[in-house]
Amino acid sequence: MTRSFMLAFGAALAIPLSALGSPLTAQENPTLRRASQAYSGLSYVEAIALARKASRERLSPADQARYYELLGFAYASLDSTRQATEAFKQVLMLNPDRGLDATRISPKITSSFALALAQVLVLREVKVDSTEFVAGVGSLPIRFHVTRTARLRTRIVGPSGQMTVDSALGEGAVSLAWNGLLANGLPPESGTYRVMIEATAGRDSYASAVTLWVEAGTVDTLPHLTGLPGYDLLPETVMPARSWKPVGLALMATSLALGGSLALESSKLGGGGRREILTIGAGAALVGVLATLKKPAPAPAHANILYNSLVREQLTRRNAEIAAENATRRRQVKLGIIPQPAAEGKS
Amino acid sequence: MRLAWLTLGLVVITGTPLRAQAVTLGAGYALADYREQADFLHFKGSGPTATVAVERGRLALRLDAWHLDMDPDKNAAPPLEPFTFDQFNVRLGIRVMSVVTVEAGYMKRWMEPSRAAQSLSAATLGVRAAYPLAPGAEVAVRTAYVAASDFAGGGSAPFGIELGLTAAYGPGSGRFRLTGDYEFQRIDRRTTQNGSRLSVPIQSSFARVGLTVRF
């Protein structure tokens, strides 16, 4: 009776290991495989001894996890809770996402596993989904579970720069969102980025990273304007039409001088010399004619200058608006996020 | 001396104007008609002149020097002797409108020999209106009241007036200009002789043709 009960209980313990596709069922190392078979045969002490023997051999990382898990199961079955917990802590360090189905595994084992889970600092179930969103408008959800209260620092690091998504104390399920912008306020360029999560609690620390492929969409920016359509700049100088005004002015000045001289001549002195005024008067008239024939100097067109300044002012304002619009567009890039396989973790 | 002329030439050719300041140098040749006291004291002559003008903002300072050799006119009463006529003018002007400048000046005239004609000094106050006709071309008229006259031979002048006409033309912007100046001056000098007042007016007119350079 006692033996049959023991067999049934042992079977209850062993079933989950195989039913869950446990690592215990697919060892590469022969010694570890024999240890697993011993565990299945309820020979827990032998299973532990064989597992210890296997640990001294060269084990692959997967076999290492299986080794500690076998130890955890065996010690828990032998009611060695402390050793079982230590073994499960190693399992969690190697495979933080490892979980046990409490409905199918003995409470002895699951309680030891839960104890280990409460003592170790790891980040579990780090999840970043494939998504598409517009940077600055939508966001990328980042979810994970931290086993103990810890300071959590989550960063996005990549070729375009980095961005701290969050830095705060957290425990249990943590849900964050990255708005798709880097520290410089701009969205990332296409490339491989990493979501790096660092957990620190006292002297314990743990880091996990998820590699993402970020596909940045193209940005359609508006070109700056060099002119306003329909508002061409006008010449700011105009060439005055040929005018006879210079001749008129020269003759008028000559007449003034000649008339004034004649009027002011002293009659007592018998009039005055004509040679001088006639010489210079003729010269002044000639200057007037030459000035009339000379190409006139361009004159500023004040109305055109004012018009051009208004057009330039409007152009500057419009380009400032375009620059602001382009800055917004450069921020609002559509990002495609594709997580790459396998999250990594290390303490 | 040759080096000095060479240096001056280089400065004139290569010099660039200072901001808001212009210096004009000029040299010319003048014809003169000089009458004094009555129609029989009539002289004609000619000689070199020189001009320096500095403009800065609204201010303009102009200096003129004349050195003329005067000979009695063929219609003058003999015996009259020739003399040299040296005159120095300085005028400081301030532009009060776009084309109008108010000028205050001082003139001094030396005659050699002094007995041949009247040496004098006087102050002037007048206006000058200069009209730009085209780039490098300008015409100007001026008039001034001649006051505070002091004559070597004594006497006074309650009235004196000057009239002037200037025409200038140069190629391009007018850095080099050919200039022509006409100056007419009448001074109503009066003296007292044996208790009676005598009117001995002085009248002169000059035509000067020269070349100026502005830098």
Image (spheres, coloured by chain):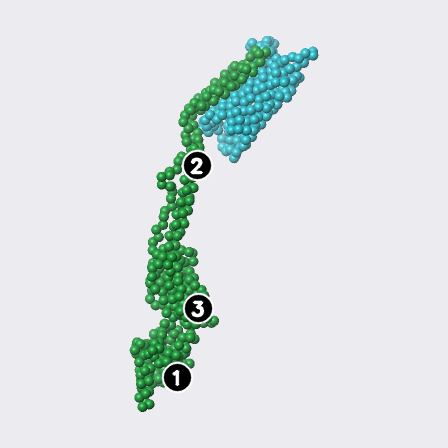
Chain colours: A green, B cyan
Residue labelled with disc 1: A79
Question: Gap in Å between the C-alphas at discs 1 and 2?
Answer: 96 Å
> Mark 1 or mark 2: which comes first in sequence?
1
Q: Residue at x 47, y 27 (%)?
A: B136
What chain does badge 2 belong to? Answer: A
Amino acid at dot 1: Asp
Q: Say whether residue A33 is visible.
A: no
Specify the quadrant that holds the C terminus of chain A: bottom left
Residue labelled with disc 3: A170
Q: Residue at x 57, y 26 (%)?
A: B103
> Mark 1 or mark 3: which comes first in sequence?
1
Using the rendered image, report if marks 1 and 2 lie on a common chain. yes
Q: Secondary structure at mark 1?
A: loop
Q: Position of residue B73 (x, y in %)?
A: 56, 12
From the viewer's perspective, is the residue at label 1 or at label 3 nearer?
A: 3
Q: Position of residue A205 (x, y in %)?
A: 44, 70
Q: Position of residue A336 (x, y in %)?
A: 33, 59
Q: Residue at x 41, y 77 (%)?
A: A115
Above or below for A140 versus A76? above
Badge 1: residue crowd in 10 Å (few <14, some 14–19, many ≥20): some
Q: Secondary structure at mark 3?
A: strand
Badge 3: residue crowd in 10 Å (few <14, some 14–19, many ≥20): some
Question: Gap in Å between the C-alphas at discs 2 and 3?
Answer: 64 Å
From the viewer's perspective, is the residue at label 1 or at label 2 nearer?
A: 2
> Mark 2 or mark 3: which comes first in sequence?
3
- Left or right placement of residue A194 versus residue A284 in this view: left
Q: Which mark is residue A306?
A: 2
Amino acid at dot 3: Gly
